[in-house]
Amino acid sequence: MDMRKLVGRNFARLRAERDLTQEAVAERANISQQYVSGLENGKRNPTVQTLFQIAQALGVSHMELVKPDDQGH
C-alpha cells in the first residue's frame, strides 16, 4: 500500500466533502498551496506534524487521513 497515495485520496475526499479549496486548507494549516497539491496527488511524504495540521484544518482526526479506503492499494 502506498501511504502517500492513500493520504492523498483521503485528503481529497475530506476536502471535497467540506467544500474547501486547496488554498483554504493551506491557509488554515499554515502550509503552501503547492505542498497541499503535491500531498493530494500522492507526491509528498508528510510528517506527522503536517498530517496533524491538515487534519485540524479539515476538522477531522489525523487518523482519518491514514485510514484504509475501499481501493485497497
Image (tube, rainbow, N blue to C red):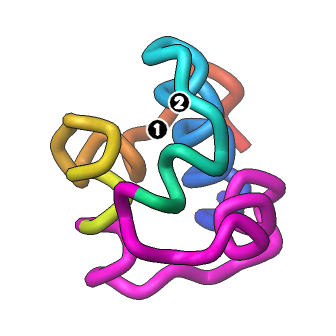
Instruction: Give the main secondary structure of the magenta stretch.
Output: helix
Q: Which mark is residue 28?
A: none
**Of the pair 33 and 9, the residue shown nearer to us:** 33
Horizontal side of 11 relative to 62 (left or right) equals right
The magenta stretch is 28-52
Local packing at callout 1 (Cα closer than 10 Å; few below 14, some 14-19, many 20+) is some
Q: Residue at x 17, y 43 (%)?
A: 61
- SS category of the residue bearing label 1: loop
Q: At which x and y percent is residue 52?
A: 24, 66
Q: At which x and y percent is residue 31?
A: 50, 76
Horizontal side of 34 relative to 16 (left or right) equals right
Residue under label 1, please give it. Answer: 68
Q: Quarter of the image containing the C terminus?
A: top right
Which of the marked residues, 1 or 2, is nearer the chain's N terminus? 2
Residue type, label 1: Pro
Residue type, label 2: Arg
Residue under label 2, please give it. Answer: 15
